[in-house]
Image (spheres, helix red, strand yellow):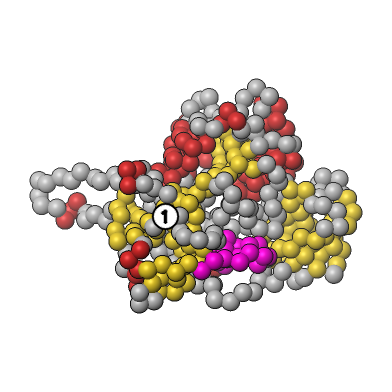
Amino acid sequence: MRKVVLKQGEEFRFEAGERPVEICLVDGVAECFGTELGPKQKKCFRLCKKAIYTPFGAVLEVEGETDIEYVSSNTNTSEIADYHLELEERRRKETPVVLVAGKGKTVTAQTLVSYAARGFKEVVYVDGDCAGGGLLFPGTANAQKITEPLCVEGRLRTENMVSHFIGTASATSQPKIYKKAIAEIAKNVLAKISAISGGVIVDTDRNTESILAEIAEVFHATDIVVVGDERLCSVLRKTVDKKVRIKEIRQSSGYVEKDDSFRRRQEEKSIREYFYGVKNTLLPFLVYVPKGGLSVTEIGESHIAPSTALPIGVSRKIQEELSSEAVDSGRLLCSVLGVSDATETRRSETAGSVHGYVFVSEVREKEVVLLAPFPGEVPSKRLLFRGLKWVGEGSSE
């Protein structure tokens, strides 16, 4: 165990690997991405890159081996706090809808959400980053009403969450699916916005710079916060409605791009947390379903031949709907499937909207064994497949 002494305005940055790192606030005031740390309470971190900031000074006790750790005073937290105070003032007269983009966007979005919750405001947090998995796991787009600061140790509870299954960590690889999901989430959120005292915070996908103006339009955005990207600010001022406020916040010197290996390990960790809880405190249920009792379809954009493959003089109408093809049971093993909430009449509208997710634990001759976070029968017999695999299941840590 070692002590870390932070002066006013400094933050303790660390990267935790597979081995857990425990941090306890022993003196002063400190927060992690907007969530205040309670005194004498140990927080456990694993497979993450975090920073603990103090506005007045603090003493931390750190136990466990980090991959890297250091103290820095070059932070943008005070800028985020100032912007939060601006939003608080405006919340008296309007309901702000804020999109966050740039390098360090997820931390900024989560900090704004937690600040609002600390001020006893209800805010809807939209996690539109397919790669980040801020609310659930990568490959999903989600929205949830937040009434308390975000948990610094892991993901949130999933009650009352609106979730759409994208099935890939890249929004640009399935742009039609992503746009449909975001539009559906926006429609759902805006229908209830009059009852949301703190407004909406949207963490955009890191690959959606080209469609940010479209996202701003469907959400009726009042603000776009850009973190550390002057060029993007300039582009947005030309492409979005003039009524939308463009706010630039400088990039934190602690920003680190996550490599593919780290993202994959985080993905496996977050999928496991969905079924077993942050600290393995939950016990998922095994559901045995006859093969004929499920309808598993692969969602995706229709694969079409290039125009050069068509006969000369023949043109083609591009199909805008999503393809939906039956999936052979042999491909299902170790897959994460979405449990569709779409009815037959609105199937094409909400191809990726789901009740929740199940994991294919075993494929037998006559039945499929599913791991589910809920007891009883699967809410819908229509399951969505996009090739999202989880290879980490098999033993409890």
Residue 392: where, in percent of width, then height? 54, 72
361 sits left or right of 332 in the view: right
Relative depth, front residue between 346 and 187: 346
Q: Is residue 47 visible?
A: no
Residue 218: where, in percent of width, then height? 46, 34
Judged from this view, the residue extending furthest toward the front is 376
* Image quadrant occupied by the N terminus: bottom right
Name the residue at 30% across, 46% down.
321
Judged from this view, the residue extending furthest toward the top is 93
Residue 390: where, in percent of width, then height? 49, 68
Name the residue at 75% across, 71% down.
65
* Image quadrant occupied by the C terminus: bottom right
378 sits left or right of 6 in the view: left
Task: Verify whether residue 207 appears in magenta.
Answer: no
Judged from this view, the residue extending furthest toward the right is 27
Which segment is the magenta one? 263-286
Name the residue at 54% across, 61% down.
375
Residue at mark 1: 380
Name the residue at 71% across, 27% down.
89
Crowding near the residue tagged with mark 1, few <14, some 14–19, many ≥20 C-alpha atoms within 10 Å: some
Task: Verify whether residue 281 appears in magenta.
Answer: yes
The secondary element bearing badge 1 is classed as: loop
Q: Amino acid at mark 1?
A: Ser
The image shows a total of numbered marks equal to 1
Q: Is residue 378 visible?
A: yes
- Where on the picture, by quarter, is residue 66? bottom right
Relative depth, front residue between 223 and 391: 391
- Where on the picture, by quarter, is residue 4? bottom right
62 sits left or right of 103 in the view: right
Residue 329: where, in percent of width, then height? 34, 70
Relative depth, front residue between 83 and 256: 83
